[in-house]
Image: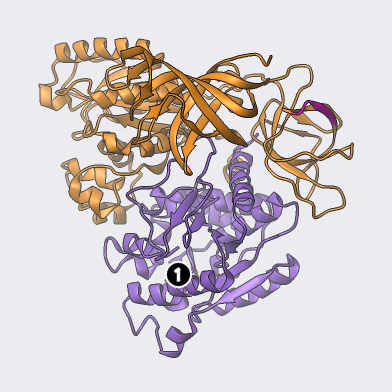
Chain colours: A purple, B orange
Amino acid sequence: MDYLDQLENRSIFVIREAFHRFKRLAILWSIGKDSTVLLSLVRRAFFGKVPIPVLHIDTGYKFSEIYEFRDRIVREWNLDLVVASNVEARAAGMGPKKGTKLECCTALKTDALKQAIRNHGFDALLLGIRRDEHGIRAKERYFSPRDQGFRWNYQNQPMELWRQYKARTDEGQHMRIHPLLHMTELDVWRYAHREKLPIVSLYFARNGKRYRSIGCEPCCSPVESEAATVEEIIEELMVSTTSERAGRAQDKEDAYNMQKLRALGYM
Amino acid sequence: MSDIENDGRGRCAVAFVGNVDHGKSTLIGRLLYDTGAVPPERLEEIGISEDGETAGAELAHLMDSLQEEREGGLTIDTTQVFFETAARDYVFVDAPGHREFIRNMMTGAGEADAAVLMVDAAEGVGNQTWRHAFLLSLLGVRNCIVIVNKMDLVAFEQERFEALRESVLELAERVDLALLAVIPASAKFGDNVVVASGNMPWYDGPLAIEALESIPATETTKLPMRYSVQDAYAWEDSPVYPGRVESGMLRAGEKARVLPDGFDVTVRAVKRFPEDLSVAETGACVGVTLAETKEIRRGQVLSDPDDLPATATSFNARLFWLGERPLLSGETFNARIACQEGPCTAVAIHRRVDTATLNILAEVADRLEEDDVGEVTLFAQRSFVMEEAACNPALGRILVEREGEVVGAGVITTIEPKA
């Protein structure tokens, strides 16, 4: 079995365990490359079907390309799309200019996610985070419980051994499940290349710039790049020395911002 | 293009284990730093200037990202970092050395192909050194490199190193680890990590980085077919049974015995989206459809009918106890073996051992305390499909839970034939 097959199979096992263990499972789809790869793995795990709702947290500040890509894939892959927004915070004008990054991400992403979980009764979520993205995400488990207040008890995480994962949550808790944890940025691109997956155009260079990590438009900076195809991105990453999230403003406000965001329930 | 596809390049997972404060995170940091693998902005984040001299202590912050870890100077949870050399790709798994975080150590080390065991040259072999060495063996991680670290604290003395080398060899023999190298080093100052040390001219063995490159590729052994049924999906005309090939090869058209029930089926198709396979290898998560109208369910195991695993209710396991409350003889808990689970009772406990010293506490015991290991005789209320871990680890590893929390982990050593 080749290397990408090994990664894929590990992910599929985790996805199927999640589906078996939880009654109301959903997948969080940011439309970025990772969660799109995750969505394709869900299709493979369930033999072409996506049997769970696909949740998109819409902050209202996303790139227009994201919405176009989302709607196309929803049609092509026959997805049960659920769009969630923190309507109150958006009406009150919350945005990257109004609050700190910590406040804005918490209101428009974490709180919107909280509302969606409550409204839809989800007890578990699949998320496309990876260990190599950030030192804090490197500490994550495949099955990672969140308490009622969405807090992540990173000081006391469940043991994971021999593909046995924590199978249940207490009342009010939900489980975050991370099937791509063992993949690197390069693995994701190699997998997307091998599987010829559709990827939103923002990742590909136009006029000497491309996005390496995408979120909300005001808080993402493109990197200098001539890579206009998946092959060229792979070649670029093989020699790159900057980190993937170098263009993400939320990481920069404070050295421990990611830890704080995630402890509060951020993805 | 091989670079695009990454053909043939596996990723070797190496766990860094050993006593707290013996320098695991610092060694990983040193390996990354001296090979130029750290992006400039990461160096800036941990306070090392790009062209400046490095003092060494901050190198651990490359692994320890939690505020509590950096301020407290110790690793709390396991973390992983990706690393590559010209020869191959690695995942370095940093495991915490503190006794309190043994679950995190096992979570990290359980995924490893090989280990680096750290020993502090000044402190010598500590309690967690013994415990971690024992746990590596229990987890099936046999290949091990020992780094005798902090040689700077013992004036780079050869005698001190040779004495420690002797105790390490004894330890490896006791727990059955294969030592690839024993290396005197200083992670803080970089001696014998990536660059040969000028302070230890008496040492002519491999550097840490060379020893890593010498880790042999994991051998795939020829084992009989075992397919764990994970679920049943009924959204097509004929149900598909997703599962994992735990060992051997699963082939379309072949007969298989469904255990523990004991009836035979024919695998009609090996399902994978978008195209079916004729054969699925060990580790493949595929699906099967059956030629017969029989139904199967999660927890059943499809097996090669000519070479069957055991189906048993009574067996012995070498069990490492993680529960705060001790295991008392007679307790019933939930046991998990691959996709099977069900209630099991500990009917007898033998050979209770303190893993900090590997001393036998009692040949016949009524309990296992936290961090003890013992030979536990288990009785399952319903039959499990299993094998001795030494023959086929996939069906030979057992986790034990109380109220959904893992309290024990072990390997099946002997199985009583079903009467």
Q: Is residue A92 left or right of residue A256?
A: right
Coordinates of residue A251 in the picture (x, y in percent): 34, 65
* Residue pictured at 19% horizontal, 11% vertical: B163
The quadrant holding residue B265 is top right
Residue B262 forms part of the magenta stretch: yes
Q: Position of residue A32 (x, y in %)?
A: 55, 65
Label 1 neighbour load within 10 Å: few <14, some 14-19, many 20+: some
Position of A206 relative to A141 (above/below): below
x 35%, y 28%: residue: B209
- Tell me what residue is drawn at x 63 percent, y 53 percent: A19
The chief SS type of the magenta part is strand
**Chain at numbered mark 1:** A
Q: Nearer the viewer, residue B220 or A80?
A: A80
Report the residue marked by disc 1.
A222
In this rendering, the count of numbered labels is: 1
Q: Is residue B279 magenta?
A: no
**Residue located at (33% from left, 59% from top):** A259
**Magenta residue span:** B261-265
Observer able to see residue B212: no
Where is residue A119? Give x, y as percent: 55, 74
Q: Is residue A183 visible?
A: yes
Q: How far across and how far down the image is residue A201, in percent?
A: 60, 69
Please state which amino acid type lies under the numbered disc 1.
Pro
Left or right: residue B298 compared with residue B263: left
